[in-house]
Image (cartoon, coloured by chain):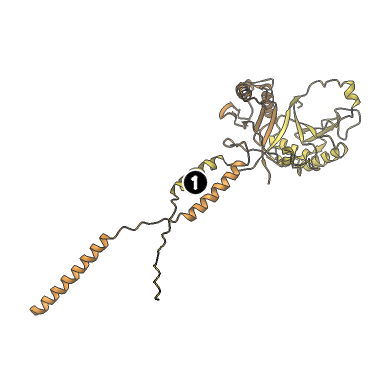
């Protein structure tokens, strides 16, 4: 029996109409471009400014408790003045305000005010590390500055006392514990001191 | 040319012209072919672009668009920005809720006539108005108002101005403050 010749069937390729999809896509692109962030933003949570006034008398209960570190960093034109437990670092014991000289001098003395790297952030970080070893449970630091100190210097000072390697993003979300390389990461801004 | 030759030539010419006419007629009868544009590769590129943009959009709940000429400070901090009201403080002015509330002096400070004991008058009014609205909205939704202010500052912003803004926010019942910074590296 002779074989019947196979019919040649041409399958038509059906192409999807992509034009409506493309229209939506091209509308989405500018909308998303408008909303996108070009630089990665982060946040530093600070406590409200406290204005220097007469300190409140400590109650008997407070006196009995362990004396806190009460770390204070004052940013001056010529460096940092660091105070702990009411006494300036390196000053004579018992004197609360020993001198107006900085505890940590400038890294680049003579540099203009616009040079934000003129402060010795590394020395401040080392000092913070020393204090953290003595007071491991303390996390707060009071930061104050002279009126003309730029914000970038204040931010880098906060970074230095918190530890430049300190990453608290995951800790803040509650997914991880606080890393060991975080020193004083809760800054309190104080005004009116200078 | 002899008359026979002439007749042959005429006939050949006629045949040639008839053939040409026929070809033209056939060409006219043919359907116009549609030109197809290759969309697949374009779709690939656009899809990848949209996914990338969607991913970068979804990473932060608050989108900060700095004002013109503003240089946001850099920091090693990595905590993400939580929801709050942003205030843009530059050496040119203070912008809150898309409105320039305060114009700075040439020294990049708030006009002393606007400040009374660290309180910046026009800014306090703007803060209070928005805080009242936000409180009302939170009350209607049955949640507690967090009162978070996101301060988007400038690298060269003076500490005294920073303090004045924070003090004013505190008086307008904002309870939490966040400095917006650009992540280093």
Residue on which disc 1 sits = A25
Q: Is residue A136 left or right of residue A11?
A: right
Q: Colour of chain A?
A: yellow
Q: Is residue B29 visible?
A: yes
Q: Is residue A45 left or right of residue A87?
A: left
Q: Is residue B103 left or right of residue A128?
A: left
Quarter-wise, where is residue B106 in the image? top right
Q: Nearer the viewer, residue B88 or A1?
A: A1
Q: Position of residue B44 (x, y in %)?
A: 52, 53
Specify few, some or many for label 1: CA neighbours under 10 Å numbering under 14, 14-19, or 20 or more.
some
Q: Nearer the viewer, residue A147 or A78?
A: A147
Secondary structure type for disc 1: helix
Q: Chain under label 1?
A: A
Q: Nearer the viewer, residue A141 or A10?
A: A10
Q: Position of residue A111 (x, y in %)?
A: 72, 40
**Figure check: A12 above or below A152:** below
**Figure check: A85 above or below B15:** above
Quick one: quadrant of the N terminus of chain B? bottom left
Quarter-wise, where is residue B105 in the image? top right
Q: Residue furthest left?
A: B3
Q: Position of residue A52 (x, y in %)?
A: 78, 24
Please report the residue visible at 51 percent of the width from the left and 50 percent of the height from the top. Answer: B46
* Chain identifier for the orange-coloured part of the image: B
């Amino acid at each position: 029996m002779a074989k019947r010749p196979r019919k040649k069937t041409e399958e038509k390729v059906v192409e999807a109409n992509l034009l409506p999809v493309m229209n939506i896509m091209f509308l989405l692109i500018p909308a998303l471009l408008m909303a996108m962030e070009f630089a990665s933003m982060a946040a530093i949570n600070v406590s409200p400014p406290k204005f220097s006034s007469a300190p409140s008398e400590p109650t008997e209960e407070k006196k009995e408790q362990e004396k806190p570190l009460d770390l204070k960093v004052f940013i001056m034109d010529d460096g940092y003045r660091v105070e702990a437990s009411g006494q300036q670092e390196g000053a004579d014991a018992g004197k609360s305000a020993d001198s107006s000289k900085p505890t940590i001098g400038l890294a680049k003395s003579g540099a203009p005010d616009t040079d934000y790297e003129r402060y010795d952030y590394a020395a401040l970080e080392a000092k913070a590390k020393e204090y953290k070893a003595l007071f491991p449970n303390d996390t707060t630091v009071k930061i104050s500055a002279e009126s003309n100190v730029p914000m970038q210097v204040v931010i880098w000072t906060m970074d230095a006392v918190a530890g430049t390697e300190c990453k608290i993003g995951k800790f803040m979300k509650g997914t991880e514990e606080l890393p060991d390389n975080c020193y004083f990461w809760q800054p309190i801004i104080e005004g009116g001191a200078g | 040319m002899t008359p026979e030759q002439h007749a042959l030539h005429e006939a050949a010419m006629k045949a040639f012209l008839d053939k040409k006419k026929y070809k033209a007629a056939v060409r006219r009868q043919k359907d116009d072919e549609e030109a197809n544009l290759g969309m697949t590769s374009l779709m690939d590129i656009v899809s990848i672009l949209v996914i990338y943009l969607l991913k970068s959009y979804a990473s932060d709940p608050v989108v900060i668009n700095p004002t013109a000429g503003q240089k946001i400070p850099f920091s090693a901090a990595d905590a993400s920005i939580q929801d709050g009201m942003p205030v843009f403080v530059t050496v040119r002015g203070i912008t809150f809720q898309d409105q320039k509330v305060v114009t700075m002096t040439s020294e990049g400070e708030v006009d002393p006539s606007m400040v009374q004991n660290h309180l910046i008058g026009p800014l306090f009014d703007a803060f209070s108005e928005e805080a009242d609205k936000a409180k009302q909205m939170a009350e209607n939704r049955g949640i507690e108002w967090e009162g978070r202010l996101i301060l988007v500052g400038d690298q060269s912003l003076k500490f005294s101005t920073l303090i004045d803004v924070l003090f004013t926010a505190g008086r307008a019942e904002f309870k939490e403050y966040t400095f917006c910074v650009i992540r280093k590296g």
